[in-house]
Amino acid sequence: MSSPPPLRRRSVTAVTLVGAFMAFLDATIVNIAVPDMETSFPRNSLGDLSWVLNGYNIAFAAFLVPFGRLADRWGRKRSFLLGLVVFTAASGLCALAGNVPLLVGARVLQAMGGALLVPTSLALLLEVFPAARRAAAVAAYGAASAVAAGIGPSVGGVLVALRGWELVFLVNLPLGAVTAAAGRRVLTESREPRGLPLPDLPGAGVLGVAVGALALAAVKAQDWGWGAPATLGFLALAAAALLVVALRSARHAAPVVDPALLRLRSFSVANAASLLFAIAFFATLLCNVLYLTAVWDYSTLRAGLAVTPAPIAASLVALPAERLARRFGARTVCVAGMLVFAAGACLYGTWIGPHPDFAGAWLPVSALTGIGAGASLPGLGAAALADVPPARFAVGTAANSAARQTGAVLGVALLVAAVGTPAPDALRHALQRGWLLAAASTVPAILLTLFLTGGTGRDGRAPAVAAEAEEEVSAPGSAATPRRAEP
């Protein structure tokens, strides 16, 4: 296939990155709206409202990979546009929701649209780049998703201040409509050959049940008790559902979790570390918002701006950290970043006082956590793809995103469990526990990252496993290089 003209390449890049940006932005932008939602829904607890965040993250994580495979079979342009329509329409339903259950349901629907957007956007993007430039395209895609997640709270703070939490969702309507109109003009349909097996959508649903049951047990354990039958029952349900996912993945032609990729040590270790570190990252993010609005009595707008230094620091560090990783190895840079992040979380929990001190206390600690996240998350994402064959970048990227979103679910759930429902005079100490929990959550991520090593082949792969993975690229159900749709 000849290389497309530069103008079309830029147009496709813009459309696909905006679509992915919307999906990743909504994974974090709603955090800042939680205090305003508490005002709108006074009868609902923080635990109830946490499902507005977790409902999105669970569905997003569970369906990223299977929807990517479905798009390979059905058509990537068609799937991308459908994802935009579903995401945009669900955003409108979120803004109109009159109660928390309806809002959570609309968020799940929104996440389903996002799960179609992300893998198809990357596949469509890679299609217009020659093989030699696809690594750069993947890096640009990763940067866009990181920026979207990072600026979510600050953008959300501005929107909530202007119109309330509903505007956080309404802003997606014009953006989605413009992107869909542009996508119809500039995108070209592509799909895999006919006969591609259907993805394991039931398996994705079971994975969602597993993550949801685990999150529910964590959120409700303080009320029910960790040894209560209900808590143990949901933990058992999560374990049983994960076992079902493992068994289905071992037998299905297009599984939710690809065993061939899991046999790549860098892929499995980096994704597991991404999940664990995301627990700490997303717990810290929500804890920051709650502390600023409830303890320091910041407005939503002021709180959104106050959390901005961390993503700025992360974006400034990401590129130098990537260069250091190429020189010294991802393991060294990621471990150093997580140690810095853990130090920042500890300082949040021990040094931030009850009275506002943005310049003297909050700003330096935020910069510290931002530097740690900027060195860790992109490095782990790159390490997860290091040994993945180029033709499977889309599936590999979707799996890494799913790991991070699963960590987000568990991070929010564990934070809610740690904070509980304290009296107003005990809220500060409860939130301090949340930060210290986040710091402790980095420990298993650091220990796991110590096992992260490169391949032993000349191209950086583990030869035997990489050869097996390459062989499976041409097998049915694999995410091979995009092909034009047949007339």
Image: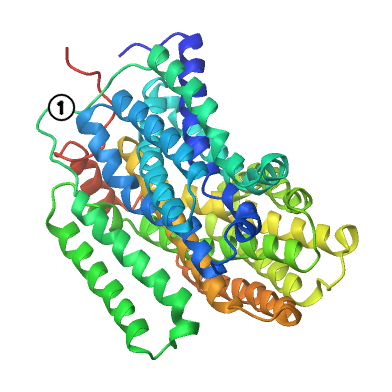
Please tell me which residue is depicted at 46% across the width and 27% down the height of the picture: 16
Q: Is residue 49 above or below residue 121?
A: below
Outermost residue on the left side: it is 195
Of helix, strand and loop, which one carries label 1? loop
Percent of width and height locating residue 149: 58, 46
* Residue 298 at least partly seen: yes
Please tell me which residue is depicted at 76% across the width and 50% down the height of the picture: 309
The residue under label 1 is 193
Q: Quadrant of the N terminus?
A: top left
Q: Quadrant of the C terminus?
A: top left
Please tell me which residue is depicted at 81% across the width and 71% down the height of the picture: 352
Q: Is residue 385 above or below residue 426?
A: above
Q: Is residue 265 left or right of residue 381?
A: left
Percent of width and height locating residue 372: 66, 58
Q: Is residue 174 left or right of residue 240?
A: right
Mark 1 crowd level (few <14, some 14–19, many ≥20, 10 Å Cα): some
